[in-house]
Image: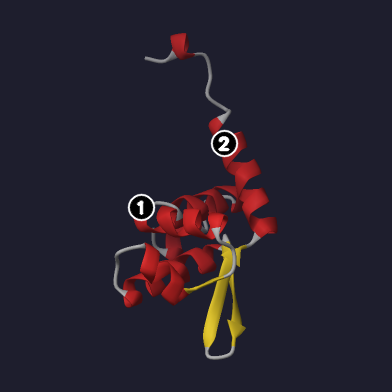
């Protein structure tokens, strides 16, 4: 969605969409799963585990970082990536609440 259209939606809607988009690729899910199991990874460590090019992994890390779900700290010439626990908890609560809003299945068309 273009930035010119996102302003017609609420902050909560935009944030939910941002997290969903960030998690909407299987490579990003694999990266997040890796970071959940081994916090504090360099991009090269992730490339060893996920069979994609380093540049592709870097692009996915960038998207995850821009969503706020992960953070990267400079460690010399490299960047150490980990889950942003505060943002992750907020996403868990917001997405969980979103998915809990389903009504009675008998009232569906």
Q: In the image shown, does 83 or 99 lie closer to the viewer?
A: 83
Q: Which residue is mark 2?
A: 98
Structural crowding at the residue carrying mark 1, measured as other residues with C-alpha within 10 Å and reported as few (<14), some (14–19) or many (≥20): few
* Above-or-below relation of 28 to 101: below
Please name the residue shown 62% across and 35% down the image. 97
Where's residue 87, x and y in %?
65, 57
Q: Please identify the residue farthest to the right as the structure is shown.
A: 86
**In terms of image quadrants, where is residue 51?**
bottom left
Please name the residue shown 48% across and 53% down the image. 33
Distance from label 2 to label 1 (Cα)?
Answer: 21 Å
SS class, disc 2: helix
SS class, disc 1: helix
Structural crowding at the residue carrying mark 2, measured as other residues with C-alpha within 10 Å and reported as few (<14), some (14–19) or many (≥20): few
**In terms of image quadrants, where is residue 54?**
bottom left
For the residues bearing labels 2 and 1, Cβ distance under 8 angstroms: no
Q: In the image shown, does 91 or 83 lie closer to the viewer?
A: 83
Q: In the image shown, does 54 or 19 lie closer to the viewer?
A: 54
Q: Is residue 77 left or right of residue 92?
A: left
Q: Which residue is mark 1?
A: 26
**In terms of image quadrants, where is residue 55?**
bottom left
Please name the residue shown 53% across and 53% down the image. 14
């Amino acid at each position: 969605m273009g930035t010119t259209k996102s302003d017609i939606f609420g902050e909560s809607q935009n944030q939910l969409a941002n997290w969903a988009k960030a998690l909407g690729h299987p490579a990003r899910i694999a990266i997040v799963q890796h970071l959940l199991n081994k916090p504090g990874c360099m991009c090269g460590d992730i490339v060893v585990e996920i069979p994609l090019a380093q540049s592709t992994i870097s692009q996915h890390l960038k998207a995850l970082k821009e969503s706020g779900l992960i953070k990267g700290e400079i460690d010399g010439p490299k960047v150490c990536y980990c889950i942003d626990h505060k943002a992750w908890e907020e996403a868990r609560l917001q997405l969980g609440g979103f998915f809990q809003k389903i009504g009675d299945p008998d009232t569906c068309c």
